[in-house]
Amino acid sequence: MSSAAMRSPRPVPSRVTQAVCDDAVPGGCIQVHVRLDELDRAIIRALVEDARATYAEIGAQVGLSAPAVKRRVDRLIASGAITGFSARVEPSALGWTTEAYVELYCRGKTSPAEIGMAVSRHPEVVSACTVTGEADALLHIRATDVRHVERVIERLAAEPFVVRTKSSIVLSRLINGSLQNG
């Protein structure tokens, strides 16, 4: 067997597909393809772990110079692979110690965009997604207490397209993960 055949295969860059939507674009949305190599993935892991890390600190972790890391981060931002930076805040520091998941059941052919626009008006909704199954959307809510959750659900149920809701209050969080192995 040749030495080339004995070597481990070279990692194949992954491809990230992102939909970019803009009213000025005919058809509304376009697909953007971004290729990520192992260095890109390592940089993203470092940023997920600590978005305030300097380019030099990240470079020391991944084996690049600070300017090379900056160039890659700039490219990842421009391509849409990195969509922003944010602070992780302990919800209890804000007094939001109760959380719930709420399934929305919508009337007719309510579009995901319509659902998204409506639920984004409620600051207690920290994430929302369309889902398979009977429900049309699943919302993650954070609130100060159960009564606050109830008021949020009442406001959501009052949206003109909502037929009904089904909710579950979180008792304890078992895993609180993030994209660190990406």
Image (spheres, rainbow, N blue to C red):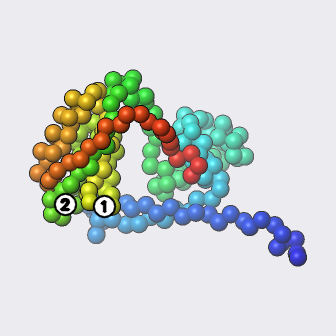
Answer with the quarter of the image where residue 168 lies. top left
Rendered residue at 61%/35% (across/down):
54
Pointer 2: what residue?
A: 110
- Secondary structure, mark 2, is loop
Tell me: 61 left or right of 111: right
Q: Is residue 5 visible?
A: yes
Cα–Cα span, label 1 and label 2: 15 Å
Of labels 1 and 2, earlier in sequence is: 2
What numbered label is drawn on residue 133?
1
Say which amino acid is labelled 2: Thr
Say which amino acid is labelled 1: Gly
Q: Position of residue 177 (x, y in %)?
A: 50, 42
Q: Residues within 10 Å of mark 1 (few under 14, many from 20)?
A: few
Up-down: is 11 above or below 182?
below
Rendered residue at 63%/49% (across/down):
42
Foreground: 77 or 99? 99
Answer with the quarter of the image where residue 2 lies. bottom right
Answer with the quarter of the image where residue 95 lies. top left
Q: Residues within 10 Å of mark 2 (few under 14, many from 20)?
A: few
Residues at circles 1 and 2 in contact by the CB criterion of under 8 Å: no
Q: Is residue 87 visible?
A: no
Q: Name the front one of labels 1 and 2.
A: 1
Rendered residue at 26%/60% (across/down):
134
Up-down: is 8 above or below 50?
below
Q: Position of residue 162 (x, y in %)?
A: 16, 52
Foreground: 80 or 17? 17
Q: Position of residue 147 (x, y in %)?
A: 21, 29
Tell me: 157 left or right of 62: left
- Secondary structure, mark 1, is loop
Task: Please identify the quadrant where the N terminus is shown.
Answer: bottom right
Rendered residue at 59%/49% (across/down):
181
Q: Position of residue 49 (x, y in %)?
A: 57, 39
